[in-house]
C-alpha cells in the first residue's frame, strides 16, 4: 500500500505532511475561566491561563474574558468550550451559577464570530468526562465545584445528566448539599459525610463500573474512596477539549 501511495506523487515532489491542528480549550467555571492551547494529542503547548469569573457573569462579560484568554494562547485552529449549564446544539438553556442573560443565548455561534474559528461547546462536566473516561463499561463523572456537575458514559457514549438538581438528602438536592455554598456553610467534615452518602447512593442508582470525581473541591475529600472511585485532575476539563471534536454525537447530545 505504501508503494502505491508514493507512486501517485508527481515526480520530483516531496509529500507534504498535514499541518498539525491546535485547539484552544476553555473551561468556564463559577469562580474562574481557564484556557490553554493543546496539540493534536491533547498535550498543553501553552501555560494554562486563568481569569476570575466576574460577579454577575453575563454573556458579554464571559465572551470578553474568553477573547482575552484566546489572545494569551496565541495561534490556534479551533476552540472547545466547557460551560457550567445545559447546552443543546450550542445554545445555553441554563447557567445557574453565572449571571443573567444566558437562557437561549447562542454561545457557540457567538464564539465563532468572536474568535473567527470553528467552535464546539458542551457542558463542563461532559468535557471533563471526555478527558478521563476509558470508553469501556458504565462510567459516571461528577464535578464538585461551585455547583454539582454530572455525566454518564456508556461504552464511551456520552449521556448528559442534571443530577445536581435531583433530590438527594433531607429534601435537598445534590447541589444544595455538595455545592460550594454547602461546603462553606456546613464545613468540610459534614460535607465529606454527605459526599460519602452520595457516592453510596449513586452506586446503587447507576451500578457504575467506575466513578470519576473532578472539580476544585475534590481536593477536600478526606476519606478512603472505594476501589472503583477515582479523583481526576482539573486539567481533564481542558484536555477533554480535544475529544469533544472526536465525539461525533456532540451536536445532538451535548445537553
Image (tube, rainbow, N blue to C red):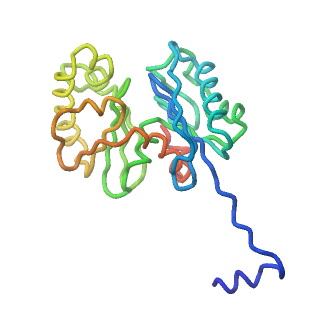
Q: Is residue 202 left or right of residue 77?
A: left
How many numbered discs, if any?
Answer: 0
Q: Furthest-front residue in view?
A: 47
Say above or below: 215 vs 60.
below
Q: Residue at x 46, y 42 (%)?
A: 127
Q: Could you tell me residue 28's position as x and y percent? A: 50, 30
Q: Is residue 219 left or right of residue 75?
A: left
Say above or below: 179 vs 25.
above
Q: Residue at x 41, y 40 (%)?
A: 160
Toward which corner of the image does residue 63 lie, by quadrant? top right
Can residue 81 be seen in this snapshot?
Answer: yes
Say above or below: 229 vs 144.
below
Q: Residue at x 83, y 80 (%)?
A: 12
For the N terminus, give its image quadrant. bottom right
Q: Could you tell me residue 228's position as x and y percent? A: 22, 49
Q: Is residue 4 left or right of residue 221?
A: right
Q: Residue at x 33, y 21 (%)?
A: 180
Q: Is residue 108 left or right of residue 168?
A: right
Say above or below: 220 vs 5.
above
Q: Nearer the viewer, residue 223 or 88?
A: 223
Can residue 85 be seen in this snapshot?
Answer: no
Q: Could you tell me residue 118's position as x and y percent? A: 67, 43
Amino acid at each position: 500500500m505504501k508503494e502505491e501511495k508514493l507512486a501517485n506523487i508527481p515526480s520530483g515532489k516531496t509529500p507534504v505532511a498535514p499541518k498539525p491542528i491546535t485547539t484552544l480549550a476553555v473551561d468556564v467555571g463559577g469562580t474562574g475561566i481557564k484556557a490553554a492551547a493543546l496539540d493534536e494529542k491533547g498535550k498543553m503547548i501553552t501555560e494554562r491561563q486563568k481569569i476570575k469569573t466576574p460577579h454577575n457573569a453575563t454573556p458579554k462579560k464571559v465572551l470578553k474574558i474568553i477573547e482575552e484568554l484566546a489572545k494569551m494562547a496565541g495561534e490556534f485552529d479551533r476552540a472547545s468550550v466547557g460551560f457550567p449549564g445545559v447546552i443543546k446544539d450550542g445554545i445555553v438553556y441554563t447557567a445557574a451559577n453565572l449571571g443573567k442573560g444566558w437562557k437561549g443565548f447562542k454561545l457557540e455561534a457567538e464564539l465563532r464570530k468572536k474568535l473567527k474559528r470553528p467552535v464546539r461547546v458542551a457542558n463542563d462536566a461532559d468535557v471533563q468526562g471526555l478527558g478521563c473516561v476509558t470508553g469501556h463499561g458504565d462510567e459516571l463523572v461528577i464535578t464538585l465545584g461551585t455547583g454539582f456537575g454530572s455525566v454518564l458514559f456508556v461504552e464511551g457514549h456520552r449521556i448528559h445528566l442534571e443530577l445536581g438538581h435531583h433530590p438527594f438528602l433531607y429534601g435537598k438536592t445534590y447541589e444544595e448539599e455538595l455545592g460550594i455554598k454547602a461546603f462553606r456553610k456546613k464545613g468540610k467534615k459534614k460535607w465529606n459525610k454527605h459526599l460519602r452518602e452520595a457516592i453510596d447512593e449513586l452506586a446503587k442508582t447507576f451500578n457504575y463500573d467506575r466513578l470519576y470525581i473532578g472539580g476544585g473541591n475534590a481536593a477536600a475529600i478526606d476519606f478512603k474512596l472505594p476501589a472503583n472511585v477515582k479523583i481526576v485532575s482539573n486539567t481533564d476539563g481542558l484536555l477533554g477539549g480535544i475529544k469533544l471534536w472526536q465525539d461525533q454525537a456532540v451536536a445532538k447530545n451535548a445537553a
